[in-house]
Each structure stands twice: as structure tokens, then as C-alpha cells.
Amino acid sequence: MLRDRRSSRSVLQCLTPFVLYEIALANAKRINIQHGNKTVHQKLDARHNGTMHSIEAHAAVQSVKDRLTKACPSFTQHQCTECNLADNRYNELPTKEQHLNRNADNECAQGALLPLAQQQSFPSTLVSSSYYVDENTCKCWKRMSVVTSAFHEPWKNLKFVQLRSDCSSSEIEIPKTDEDKTSFVVATNNQQMGSFNFFDSGVSKMGHTSADVAPCVEYGHTYNRHTCD
């Protein structure tokens, strides 16, 4: 009898955690043991779902890394921040015509935007930005924080800018619903142009204010081009 008990204990110890979970879940559903506001089986379900979500999230992150490596094998993050302001030839005090035609130089993303790192969650995104890579062109796009996207309806849009070699920057808006909630890959099928920045705000705040912000007050923002064709 003692030997049978020891044998049963050994078998039980060899069972995998998922088998133990199924046994405990079935038992909890049968007896419906109440524990606080949740039954035992509800808590086990939550724990199991959390584990599965973590596994899926890890797999999604790895999948994005693999896609990025395959599409842009020579990409390095310094490409996201390098530019030479001395090469910038835009007017810091643009005319009305220059202002309203600024989107003639704007560029849109050509492929899905792949995150370079696991994305932060709210409220960190209020003040923090992050980098993505265009899967088709390997250009780096910066996802702007909520604070710096105040004029782009950040409750429903994501704002991205792509720094150019002369420290100007392209700008696009993408519906938040086009971001995959597991991999954080952002589809660009529904992107719209924002407003081309003669001077990127992250490089020259003074130039950005005089050339990109002030003209909006004086001339408005009905640009001659606003769609990604």
C-alpha cells in the first residue's frame, strides 16, 4: 500500500504544469469553490491566459526581429538620428506659397513599419518616442509622443516623422487601429500626410518654430498636397 502511494506521488510529480492546470480547472469547475469575488477556476484561467499571452508576445517580437533582419540586414539605429543641418537650404521665414506647397517634398512610408524595440505602454507614450523601420525602404521613422502629436488628434492617430539627411523631416499620420496590438507592427495602407517640416523639431527647435509652426498661424494649413498616392 505504501509502495502504491509512493508510486502515485512519483507519477504526479512528473506531470507537466499544463496537465496539472487542466486537472485543477476541471475540479474547480465541478465544485465551484468561491474565493473572494472569483472562483478558483476563473483565477486559473486568468493565470493560464496570461502565460499564453506572454508566450505569444515573445513569439511576435521575435518574428518582427526576423522580418527586420531579412528586409534590412545592414540597418543600424544611428540612421534614425544622423543629419547635417549645414546642408539644409529651406527658408526659415517661408513665403505663403512655400508654406502651402511644403508637402511637395513630403514622403510617405512604402511598407509596414517594424518597431526596433518592444513598445512602451500608456502613460509612458505621453512623453516618450520610439523608432520603427520601413520594411520596404529600410528608412527609419520616429513615432512621436502624444505630447508632440497634440495637433494630430493623438487619441485616434499615430504621428511619425522621418529625418532626412539635411535635417528636414517627412511626416505622416496613421490610424491607431492599424497598429497590431501583439507585435506592434504598424500597417501603412491608411496613412495620410501630415505636414513636411523644413526643420525637424528634434534637431532645431528654433528653426522648426519659425519655419513650420509660425506660418500655420499666419497662412493656415490647407496644404496643396495631403494624400499618399
Image: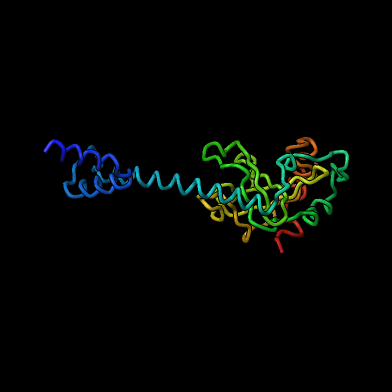
Instruction: Count the marks.
Output: 0
Which residue is found at the position 62% from the left and 61% from the top?
Answer: 189
Q: Quadrant of residue 144?
A: top right
* Quarter of the N terminus within the rendering: top left
* Quarter of the C terminus within the rendering: bottom right
* Residue reaching furthest to the front: 3
The x, y position of residue 184, in whole percent, is 56, 49
Which residue is found at the position 34% from the left and 42% from the top?
Answer: 47
Which residue is found at the position 70% from the left and 57% from the top?
Answer: 136
Which residue is found at the position 40% from the left and 44% from the top?
Answer: 51
The x, y position of residue 179, in whole percent, is 56, 52
Front-most of residues 65 and 201? 65
Which colour style is shown?
Answer: rainbow
The x, y position of residue 13, in whole percent, is 27, 39
* Residue reaching furthest to the left: 1
Left/right of residue 43 with respect to residue 64 in the rendered view: left
Left/right of residue 200 with respect to residue 65 in the rendered view: right
Front-most of residues 21 and 96? 21
The x, y position of residue 43, in whole percent, is 29, 42
Left/right of residue 186 with respect to residue 222 in the rendered view: left
Front-most of residues 173 and 134? 134
Q: Quadrant of residue 135?
A: bottom right
